[in-house]
Each structure stands twice: as structure tokens, then as C-alpha cells.
Amino acid sequence: GQQVMQIPQYQHVQEGEDFTTYCNSSTTLSNIQWYKQRPGGHPVFLIQLVKSGEVKKQKRLTFQFGEAKKNSSLHITATQTTDVGTYFCAGGKVSGYALNFGKGTSLLVTP
Amino acid sequence: EAGVAQSPRYKIIEKRQSVAFWCNPISGHATLYWYQQILGQGPKLLIQFQNNGVVDDSQLPKDRFSAERLKGVDSTLKIQPAKLEDSAVYLCASSPGTSGASTDTQYFGPGTRLTVL
């Protein structure tokens, strides 16, 4: 079945450094969503990408959806300690309802 | 606006016992999801309801897990009997979309942390 792979699994950066996490699917996706989960918390929706090659920005966060709609990335510029958490991508099937979540990338930011 | 409510927040049981979780979605949300999140992994969809009908339960271990949403609002998820590998956080989410499509934004509850000894 459809699998969504995320790399890296962990990333430790100094505050002010950039951070990128990548999401890859074995099949073409209809859409991709990104969620953030703080330690001990629950996933919180960040953004959705639907169009091939789409790029969206939220302040220091930049989200991209690949041309083939099989991969996506989240880039954070100049990380802050408030960015700490696990970032999940979730891909939607072309035919179907469910979102398949990746295993997430855990980001640790030290001051 | 109140968020998704779940109870209990924590539960410890012994293997072979039964357990039930409750979820109250955001008011007016037609779609309700139950996810299992094992430590270090992403949420795995167990079942998706559209109002009180099941849209997707392909990953629900039906020999031991059951879920219902009788009046299209609250939902319960039951495990009977529990196994050690069922230790996880069980997340409930809801979305306002009426189609249940994957493009709907999902709003997650705080989860129930289950430990099976």
C-alpha cells in the first residue's frame, strides 16, 4: 500500500540555523498536509499543498510539493527554540479518503 | 470554540483486559477519525466515520478493536482483549468537511495514553 517516508528521523540544530525535512511517497499523492506535534502534545495542522510544484510560506516556514506530487519538503529558516517538536507529513491517496502519516522528523533546537 | 475532547487521558491495564476510549468532536464536525500513535511513529488511521457511517476501517484489527458513532456525534473505541503491542496513544480527530476527503483539515484531541502490562 501507499507509504510515506520522512527523513531525517531526528535533527539537532543550534538556534538560528536552518532546518529541512523531506517527505517521499511511493505513489502519486492527491495532496499533502504538514502537522507539528510538540513534546507531549497532539498534532496541529500547519498547511496543505494540493498543486504540482506548489510552494507556500508561513513566516519562517517554506513548504514545497514536488512536480510529480510524490515528494514534499518543509524548510525552517533561522530556527528558534519554539520550533522544537516533531513535524509530520501526511499524504492523501489519489483515490480514497485516508491520510497516511510519515514517521515524522523530531527537531531539537538548542540556544 | 471547544476542541476535540477525549477521555480518559491515561489508562493502565493488564493484557487480556478490555478498555474503552471516548471522543467528543468539535461541534458540527461531520467526520471523525481514530488514530493509533505508537511511540516514535506517526499516527496510523484505525477508522474514519462520516457522520455515523464508516468510510475507512481497513487498518482496524477487527478481531479485537471495535468503534462506533451511533448518533453521528460522540464515538467510542474499544479494545477487547488488549495485547502488549496495543500500548500507544489513541488520538481522536475531527474535520468539518462533509465529504470525508483527505483534503479536509483535521483537528486532533489530546489523546489517551494506553499502557498494557
Image: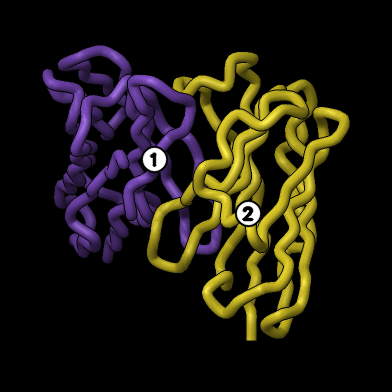
Chain colours: A purple, B yellow
Q: Can residue A98 be seen in this view?
A: yes
- Find numbered disc 1 in the image and state the secondary structure of the residue it sits on: strand
At which x and y percent is residue A90?
37, 37
Mark number displayed over residue A100: 1
- Observer-side mark, 2 or 1, equals 2
Q: Residue at x 23, y 37 (%)?
A: A74
At 42% from the left edge and 40% from the top edge, which residue is drawn? Answer: A35
3D distance between C-alphas at marks 2 and 1:
20 Å
Quadrant in the picture for residue A84 = bottom left
Q: Mark 2 lies on which chain?
A: B
Q: At label 1, which amino acid type do we have? A: Asn
Q: In this view, does A54 lie to the left or right of B39?
A: left
Locate residue B45 relative to residue A19 in the image: left or right.
right
Is A19 or A81 nearer to us in this picture? A19
Indicate the position of residue A21 as horizontal and vertical percent values.
20, 46
Residue at 79% in and 37% down: B69
Question: Which image quarter is the N terminus of chain A in?
Answer: top left
Give left or right: position of A24 versus B80.
Answer: left
Q: Name the residue under label 2.
A: B62
In front of the other: A14 or B54: B54
Q: Closer to the camera, A26 or B111? A: A26
The image shows residue A13 at horizontal and vertical percentages of 19, 60
Q: Which picture quadrant has residue A105?
A: bottom left
